[in-house]
Structures are given as C-alpha cells and as structure tokens.
Amino acid sequence: MLAPRELKVLNPPARIGVVGGGQLGRMLAMVAKRMGYEIWILDPAPNSPAGQVSDHQIVAQFSDAAAVRELAANTDILTYEFEQIDADILCELEEEGLVVCPSGSTLQKIKDKFIQKTLLKEAGLPVPDFWPVNSKEDVLNLLKNKGRLVLKTCSGGYDGKGYWFLKDQADVEEAFQAFKGLHLMAEAHIDFKMEISILAARGKNGVTRFYPVAENQHQDGILYLTRVPARISETVAMKAKEVAQGVLETLNDYGLYCIEMFLTQDDQIYINEIAPRPHNSGHYTIEACKTSQYEQLIRVLAGLPLGSTELITPCAMVNILGDGKVQGTYEVAGLEEAMLEEDVFVHLYNKKNTDKRKKLGHITVLAEDTDLAEAKALRAIRKIKIKAK
C-alpha cells in the first residue's frame, strides 16, 4: 500500500529544505550538494553545522511558524533532522500542497512515545508493555504489580534525557521531581543482552531497502560505539528485518527510518524507539556501505531509485564526545596520531562550543572483522583530545 501522495522526481538543482541544522543535517547537505541539489536550512543557531555547508540558512526558532513557511516557500520538498519540532505546521503545509517527507502526520505519531507505542502495539509489532501515567500513585501501583519500570517523558527525550529507571519508591520520588509537569508514560524494564538497530528506507513506488543490523553500545544513555554487522544469528537478523518491514507498513509513508530494538537473552526482539530520519547508529554507512543513509534519504526526497544497502566491509563507529573538562570554544587535537592506521575516517561537525557528552564528531573504522574494527576505533578515539581554545 502506497502513501497517500506519490513522490515526484526532483531534478538538480531542485531545492531541499531541512528543519534542523545539526550534524545530521550537515552530512545530508554535503551529499545533496555533491548530487547537485540546493539546500536550505532552518536553525536558531547562526552558522549552524548544517548551515555552514548549505546554500542558505534561515536563523529562527523551530516554533516560528512564519520561518517554517519561509523555508517551505523557497524549497520543493521539506524534511527534518530531529523530532522535536512542530508537526502541526508541517501538516498545514501539506494540506496547502507542499510535500513533507516523512509527513507531518507521521511525525505526530512518532514524536509522542505513547502514541508511537500504541500504534505499534495495535499493528501487532513487538513492544514492551507500557501504560499511561497520570499520577505518582499510578507508577507506585505498577511498580508493585509489574516489577521494574522505565518512566519516560512522552516527548522531548534524547541522548540519555527523558527517562528514569525505577526499582523502588525513592526512584519514583526522584523521577517525579525531575519530570514535574511533563506528560509521562511507564514501560516495562526489558532485561536485554544487546541493543540493536536497523535503517529502513521506503522510496518512490513503495520500494524498500534495509541496511545491515547494527549493534550499539551506550554510555549514560548516549550512543558510544556501533559495530556492523551485529553479533547475532541470521535468524535474529531476519527477525529484525521483518519487524522493520512491519514498521514501514504501519507508518505507510516515505522516508528513512531507524528502528532501535532490544534483543533479550532468549533472542526476542522488542522495539524501543523509531527515528524518522538519519540516525547516529547509521553514520557508518558513509564509508562502509555502497549507499550512505544520507544519500539514501536524498534519493527518497528526489524521487530517485533507492541505492544498494550492501555492506562493503565490517566496521565500527565511535562517537567523539565532549568530556566536560572543557566548556565553550575548543579545538580537536590528536588527529595526526588517530589517523596513523589505515581505514580510519574522522568526521568533525564544527560545532562552536563543547560541553559534557556533547557530540562533536565520530570516527568510522573499516577492518576484516568487527573485533578488529572496534579495537582500532578505540585506539583512535583515545588519541583524540578536546582542548580549550
């Protein structure tokens, strides 16, 4: 079943608008320019990472409806690089004839985690048990009857923010203090052995492509290391692909999606979250796949045939994060040592300031197998130093 509006072919130099000017928008813009497209960015930070490599940047808040309309008026299609934007204005623009990909209605379903999980559950897809939360008493009763929980904000959480692990009443008290006034949901705690993700693209005429399953390691809720291919059986890999296919069919929309999943000790899969955009765990595709996730999204937006998602070689990707010792302006030292070995690729996002756990760049390493790639990536990241400027 195809999405309501078919994508038309956009010939270069058609204009692509991106709401958001961070690193995802930056890497998307760099590919778009290589392919001959004009890129417009909307972001509140002047000279944003994406704006630096784009044709135009509109400096405005994401909530500024007039600015979003200005972006739409100057482009042929809109997309976005993160979820915390006003989906309603995107829906209004679509009603007026503009194409947004993924659609505003898809964003409405995904950005609210309770709505997202409800949609997936109704479609018969595997998700942890979850419940609405209206009061502290709701959570205490669930904790008593269901065991360990994860309390989540229904919107706005990312990179280790917006969730709280609960095992006793003291945790509940702390969580409600931290999340005061926010819309909340509770989710059963999954005792997983591995976090995995898979990128899935759906393009013109409903054609789909799936990337290899990635294995992800987090620190303080932030992705630190990705290994591809994941250390899973072919049976589990096929199951992950089937779940991703179910997500695409449920959303019934075009775009590039990352489906994050938990893999349990007995190889059961549960969907954690869906991102309707390129994803940190897909950075490896730039060097390690025949078509990067960024080129794939441009192909979707421009109505072009989807590219091959074949993995060229095993790889590992590690994030370059601020360590908190340096805040504000900075410089990155150690590249001459980090890049001594072959097949080490450093990507820096040129953000103006650093802070603790802030994503400043990433390193992708190619090797004969993922163990070698991971070892080489960890050697490289230890050479990188964030220094005050």
Image: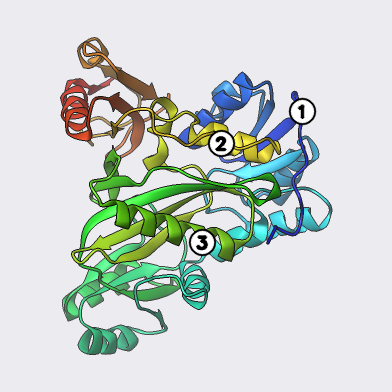
Q: Which of 295 and 232 is in front in this view?
A: 232
Q: Cβ–Cβ below 8 Å for labels 2 and 1?
A: no
Which amino acid is tagged 1?
Answer: Asn
Q: How far apart, in angstroms, are the residues tagged by discs 2 and 1?
A: 16 Å
Q: How far apart, in angstroms, are the residues tagged by discs 2 and 3?
A: 18 Å
What SS does tag 3 mark?
helix
Q: Residue at x 44, y 28 (%)?
A: 286
Which amino acid is tagged 2?
Answer: Gln
Which amino acid is tagged 3?
Answer: Val
The dot on residue 296 is: 2
Looking at the picture, how far across and down is residue 305, in whole percent? Answer: 65, 36
The residue where tag 1 is placed is 11
Looking at the picture, how far across and down is residue 82, in whole percent? Answer: 52, 47
Dividing the picture into quadrants, the one containing residue 229 is: top left
Q: Which residue is drawn at 47% across and 63% down?
A: 155
Looking at the picture, how far across and down is residue 42, in whole percent? Answer: 63, 38
Residue 99 visible to an observer of this rendering: yes
Q: How far apart, in angstroms, are the residues tagged by discs 3 and 1?
A: 30 Å
Q: Nearer the viewer, residue 268 or 58?
A: 268
Disc with the residue nearer the chain's start (3 vs 1): 1
The dot on residue 3 is: none
The dot on residue 247 is: 3
Residue 321 visible to an observer of this rendering: no
Left or right: 9, with 201 as reference point:
right
In the rendered view, would you say 312 is above or below 20? above
Left or right: 255, with 240 as reference point:
right
Q: Residue at x 56, y 31 (%)?
A: 295
